[in-house]
């Protein structure tokens, strides 16, 4: 019960980290043959890109609160 969780102070925003991860994941499958492993990496890259843009979408001026 004395174990404490390690706290990490992030120096970059979540959006920056997710965008970097998406770029890294996109460059990886280029050398892989077509198949499940390549498709899995591309899917993870798309998810990371979506996560990177999520905060922009939520804070956009066009987004209206429910009435």
Image (cartoon, rainbow, N blue to C red):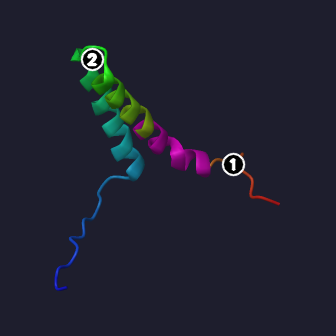
**Mark 1 to mark 2: distance in Å?**
37 Å
Q: Which mark is residue 61?
A: 1
Residue at 74% over, 58% down: 65
Question: Dot 1: what SS?
Answer: loop
- Give the x, y percent position of residue 8: 24, 65
Q: What stretch is highlighted in magenta?
A: 48-58
Identify the residue at horizontal 52%, vertical 46% (top origin): 54
Residue reaching furthest to the right: 67
Q: Which residue lies furthest to the left in this view?
A: 2
Q: Is residue 47 left or right of residue 9?
A: right
Magenta residue check for 57: yes
Is 10 placed left or right of 51 in the picture? left
Front position in the image: 55 or 35? 35
Which residue sits at x=64%, y=47%? Answer: 60
Q: Is residue 33 magenta?
A: no
Helix, strand or loop status at disc 2 = helix
Q: Residues within 10 Å of mark 1 (few under 14, many from 20)?
A: few
Identify residue for label 2.
Answer: 30
Kindly report the secondary structure that dominates the magenta region of the rendered protein.
Answer: helix
- In the displayed structure, 11 sits above or below 48; it is below
């Amino acid at each position: 019960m004395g174990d404490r969780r390690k706290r990490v102070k992030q120096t970059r925003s979540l959006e920056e980290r997710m965008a970097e991860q998406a770029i890294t994941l996109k460059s990886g499958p280029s050398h892989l043959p077509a198949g499940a492993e390549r498709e899995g990496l591309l899917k993870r890259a798309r998810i990371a890109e979506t996560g990177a843009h999520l905060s922009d979408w939520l804070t956009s001026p066009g987004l209206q609160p429910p009435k």
